[in-house]
Image: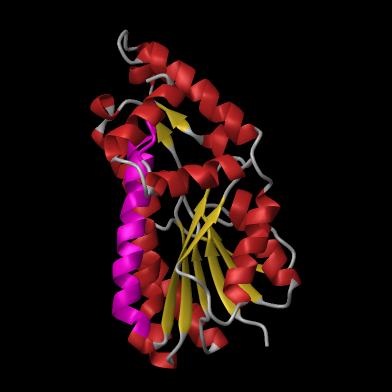
Amino acid sequence: MGKVIIITGASSGFGKSAAELLSHRGHTVYGISRREIEITGVNSLALDVRDKEAIQQNLKAIAEKEGRVDVLINNAGMGIGGALELASTEEIDVQMGTNFMGCVNMCQAVLPYMRQQGCGRIINVSSIGGVMGLPYQGFYSASKFAIEGFSEALSAEVKRFGIQVCLVEPGDFATGFTASRRNSEVTLKDPDYGPVFRHSLHLIEKEENGGLKPEKMAQRLAKIAECHNPKMRYVVANLEQWASVVLKRFIPGNWFVNILRGYYKS
């Protein structure tokens, strides 16, 4: 039987590919993004995940129409590059508000319906930047670290209601995320941070543009949504990045930071 699936960030990248695939596989899919989208077989909702009241109203309408909500995929996200020291309050608020609080708002809106029906699955898209602090993407990493901790705690709290919580940690993918990243002009112009930031940004963009295709992530998300007993965590990355996640678990913290510094020339 097809599931009722809600996915955020459905206008491009992972979200769009996953929405298309899940709809094709016979599920009822609601795609949420900040602007109207047209995807065959997908119900489009123009919403900002930072708008808690609007999210709650629309989740209520979906639950009343469909009679249930089986899966929530929290995929909405954005990136702001720059030095942590120079980040503005507005940049921090947008980064954390979209990536972390957007995830929180969606979870809080869907949980009452999942508790009532006695089952449900929440899939939160984190990042390998959520298990290691990436230079000049510090608040992006912070937002993903927050999702990691939030998801672990949430899993412990809601398991008794029949609700499963999963984390997906993608590495570099060739999506529109790279082109839409906001980069700090203050950092670029700073005599101390600017040269290193530009070098790091060039490396980051090169790896992202040469990364995996979003269809691979969509296939993994579909598998997690459909399987009977999913794992808590999934790393979806190339071999080198997967190995870096494993390595971080076993070596001293200062060693790993030095590896990052050398890699990004920071």
> Along the line of sight, which residue is nearer the eye, 58 or 259?
259
> Along the line of sight, which residue is nearer the eye, 230 or 71?
230
Q: Residue at x 36, y 12 (%)?
A: 189
In the displayed structure, does residue 86 sit left or right of residue 121?
left
> Along the line of sight, which residue is nearer the eye, 195 or 49?
195
Task: Please determine whether, in this image, residue 226 is positioned above or below residue 263.
Answer: below
Q: How is the image coloured?
A: secondary structure
Residue 50 in sight in this render: no
Where residue 230 sits: x, y (%)? 53, 74
Where residue 224 sits: x, y (%)? 58, 70
Where residue 7 sits: x, y (%)? 54, 65
Q: Quadrant of the C terminus?
A: top left
In the displayed structure, does residue 153 sit left or right of residue 185?
left
Q: Residue at x 61, y 81 (%)?
A: 3
Task: Please determine whether, in this image, residue 67 is positioned above or below residue 124.
Answer: below
Task: Please determine whether, in this image, residue 142 is positioned above or below residue 160.
Answer: above
Q: Residue at x 53, y 24 (%)?
A: 203
Magenta residues span 133-159
Where residue 112 sits: x, y (%)? 36, 83
Residue 245 in sight in this render: yes
- Residue 152 forms part of the magenta stretch: yes
Magenta segment's dominant SS is helix
For the image, the number of numbered tags is 0
- Residue 90 forms part of the magenta stretch: no
Q: Quadrant of the N terminus?
A: bottom right
> Along the line of sight, which residue is nearer the eye, 13 or 37?
13
Q: Residue at x 37, y 78 (%)?
A: 111
